[in-house]
Image (cartoon, grey):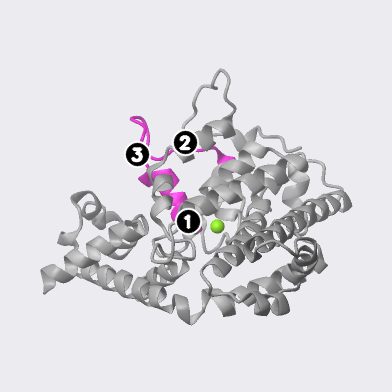
Amino acid sequence: MPDTGALAERAHPEPPHPYRLPFERDRARIIHARAFRRLAGKTQVFTHRYSDHFRSRLTHTMEVAQIARTVARTLGLNDDLAESLALVHDIGHPPFGHAGERALDEALREFGLRFDHNLHALRIVEHFESRYAEFRGLNLTLGVREGIIKHSRDYSAVEHPELAEYFLDLRPPLEAQLIDLVDEIAYLTADLDDGFEAEILSLNETRAGVRLFEEFYAPMRIRYAGSVEKLVVNEALKRVLNALVDDLIAETGHRVERAGATTLEDIRHARERLAAFSPAMEELRMEAKRYLYVHLYNSPELAYDHDEAEQVITTLFRAWVSDPALLPASHAAQIDDTGAPRVVADYIAGMTDQYILNQYEAWISRKG
Ligand code: MG
């Protein structure tokens, strides 16, 4: 449906590839990026203290990508654009999941700055990735860069004049609108799965507290009465995921039709974002999400990891800001232009969990 013409433009014009389309090239550039490879070493919800088979930020990203492709293709959208956006959607996340992001944001606030993973992702693909002799960054298409900052929230044009080229007063294309919702589908089902496996979530409490789970678990319990619990849970979760995907596709299709949107311009000027769950599913999704916050994300079992994340990030941030000579030369060189707090935050945000833990140990032993 969308005319990809303007969306396929790059800041540094490049000749067309003989057989690869612009968003396919972006997908390849993202997969070959250093920041993408580091997602393998970054926490999604569980640190490696728990298990090596729980989701990392990389495997979460791959789950989002495959769901995004299905939804985009079924809705007749550009699945290469949707997949590229999914692959890049978490590339700006610091180590240690949301606890790490919170700690970095709080450290920056002392200097009147904020950490925002979408804006950081844009800096990575525009400045920090260095793969080309002729320009900095990955020279991604406008469609992917716009999607990076607009997939999960809207930024005000007044507060962010530097983002002027991204049509801040207009809605993003549907491919970008979908990403945040697909992300929710992926992590909601994955975190139930890993939460049971970690024995942090209780099956009975979850059945009582999450209607969306119980709706599919109860019939599977009867159908597979002789099966081990794990397989019954898997059968239920698979159906939860399908129900969310079905609902997202159907509701988005209805809203596009109701709005009479047939072009990208229509999508951009629509009164609200057109990608959405139905009101009934949205209520169930929110119930499940609230449940996960209470029983998993903010559970006492994960508090150790959150405290460690805060301790490590806050300590190193303060140490490096007060003595930038400790930074690698390439980072120290950016301080005159960018200021020490932002440079240190950029440095920390790029690290994997293990790398920053090693840095922390080295700092502690040097100090001791
Ligand atoms: Mg995500």
> Residue 120 at x, y = what percent?
44, 56
Res. 29 mark: 2
**In the image, is residue 106 part of the stretch drawn in magenta?**
no
Q: Tell me how far mark 3 sits from mark 2, CA to CA.
A: 11 Å
- Residue drawn at (66%, 59%) of the image: 231
> What residue is at 56 percent from the left and 69 percent from the top?
195
Going from N to C along the chain, the mark reached first, 1 or 2, is: 2
Mark 1 vs mark 2, foreground winner is: 1
Residue 154 visible in the snapshot: no
Q: Which of 8 and 101 is in front in this view?
A: 101
Residues at badges 1 and 2 in contact (C-beta under 8 Å)? no
Q: Is mark 3 on a helix, strand or loop?
A: loop
* Label 1 environment density (alpha carbons within 10 Å; few <14, some 14–19, many ≥20): few
What crowding class fits label 3: few (fewer than 14 Cα within 10 Å), some (14-19), or many (20 or more)?
Answer: some
Front-most of residues 148 and 314? 314
Q: Which amino acid does label 1 sit on?
A: His
Amino acid identity at mark 3: Ser
Q: Distance between the residues labelled 3 and 1?
A: 31 Å
- What residue is pinned by disc 3? 130
Q: Where is residue 65 in the image (x, y as percent from the top left)?
A: 59, 46
Determine the residue positioned at 37% across, 77% down.
307
Q: Which label number is shown at residue 53?
A: 1
Q: Give the range drawn in magenta.
A: 118-143
- Could you say whether the residue bearing mark 2 is in a helix, strand or loop? helix
Q: Nearer the viewer, mark 3 or mark 2?
A: 2
The question of residue 124 being in magenta is answered with: yes
Quarter of the view holding residue 262: top right
Tell me where residue 293 sits by quadrant: bottom right
